[in-house]
Image: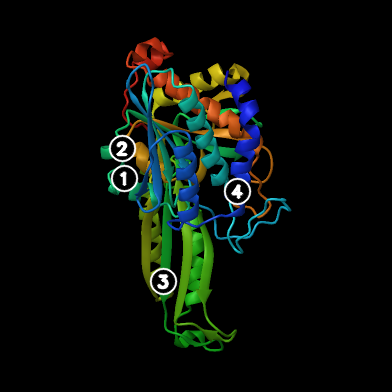
Amino acid sequence: MFDGWFATQKPTVTAWFHELHRHPELGFQEQKTAAFVETQLRSFGLTPETGIGGTGVVATLVGTRGPGRSIGLRAELDALPMQEENGLSYASRETGKAHMCGHDGHCVTLLTAAQYLTTHPDFEGTVHFIFQPAEELLEGAQAMIADGLFERFPCDEIYALHNMPGLEKGAIGVPVGAAMASADAINITIHAKGTHGAAPHTGADGVLAAASFITSVEQIATRVFDARQAGVISFGAIHGGTVRNILPAEVRIEGTLRTNNANARENLIAAIDRVARGTETTHSVTIDAEVIPMAPVAINDPIASEAVAFAAETALGADHVIRNAAPIMASEDFAFMLEQVPGSFFFVGQDGPFPHHPAYIFDPDVIPTGAAVFVELVKQRGTSNIHSTHCSADNENISNGRTL
């Protein structure tokens, strides 16, 4: 039924996608994007609420068979501060801004599911269509939660998706447990006694200390957590000095820490501080080491992940579903929502470069793939008699608590 309906709606859906792609907006600036979403939701007969967490939009639909259980579906509104280099006919018209992560496609996927469900409301359950700002800043989910998202729109479960180059096109990948990594910003400031490069013994070499610090952190990182876990520290910026023959008085290093396990995260943060203290002693410098939490590990609820897999099998066929899909080390602020409500974050496969690459292109062919899964989740998980929907015997005995 969904496929036949989508065939008639594809030109409209494509037009939505092109419109959003041409006019990207950065986090908490998504005024036009939010207005576009609001307009479409109203055209479906819904009554969206706007300005949630800044520019967020939420609309609610109750099935004609009764309110049942409440299911949240989330998509993102924001773009990235970068220039696309892919030659699209509908490329961004905003210099230095582009949808290079596919949030425009995710947004249209959720709009498509919303339109289908409003025109086919013969289901039990309540669905909240959640359009979130500022995911790229890892701040939008927290802003919506702080603005009373789950008090105003209570959810028994919540789901979100992300396109995934490298996964077979049209496949649904469902991680169990950790789906996306935590994110922490690392700021290191090394204070040294600057001096002439011809007489380093008269001062302290902050550049050498920086090199030693980075090398030591990378060496020790693999020895402070279980090798079966995943963790990575990457330093992407280093600033110090102005001329080749003067040792600077200050060197700054910026990096990122990603893990898929809370204990590994704590161990790596502690290791960074230990290395800083050791570098101080070795190089006669002082170091300010700051690790700023950005997002926790996104932990999928096991029952919710099984629900995604079964919904995808129903909508697409079992051969399109990858259970226990590998998590990735990118981060998502949907993790904050998963801390509040049981749910699952899943992947939709497509071809091409990975998101955030200047040649990245979201594949609009996967819009109906994700929308069909969203629709099935609402139909299957919204019923108040939840045991009438698929749930394996093993999953019946799994706690809804978060696991690592």
Which residue in the structure is indicated by mark 2? 340
Which residue in the structure is indicated by mark 3? 189
Q: Quadrant of residue 336?
A: top left
Which residue in the structure is indicated by mark 4? 19
Q: Secondary structure at mark 1?
A: helix
Which of label 4 and label 1 is nearer to you? 4
Mark 3 neighbour class, 10 Å CA radius: few under 14, some 14 to 19, many 20 or more? many
Q: Position of residue 119 (x, y in %)?
A: 49, 25
Q: Earlier in the sequence, mark 2 or mark 4?
A: 4
Q: Secondary structure at mark 3?
A: strand
Q: Is residue 220 above or below residue 151?
A: below
Q: Is residue 139 left or right of residue 78?
A: left
Q: Secondary structure at mark 4?
A: helix
Q: Quadrant of residue 121?
A: top left
**In front of the other: 252 or 133:** 133
Mark 2 neighbour class, 10 Å CA radius: few under 14, some 14 to 19, many 20 or more? few
Q: Position of residue 326 (x, y in %)?
A: 54, 33
Total residue callouts: 4
The circle drawn on residue 145 is 1
> Residue sitting at 71 percent across and 51 percent down?
88
> Residue sitting at 41 percent across and 13 percent down?
389
Image quarter of the N terminus:
top right
Q: Earlier in the sequence, mark 2 or mark 3?
A: 3
The answer for how far apart the CA atoms under marks 4 and 1 are is 28 Å
Q: Amino acid at mark 1?
A: Ile
Q: Amino acid at mark 4?
A: Glu
Q: Earlier in the sequence, mark 4 or mark 1?
A: 4
> Residue sitting at 58 percent across and 55 percent down?
23
Q: Secondary structure at mark 2?
A: helix
The answer for how far apart the CA atoms under marks 3 and 4 are is 44 Å
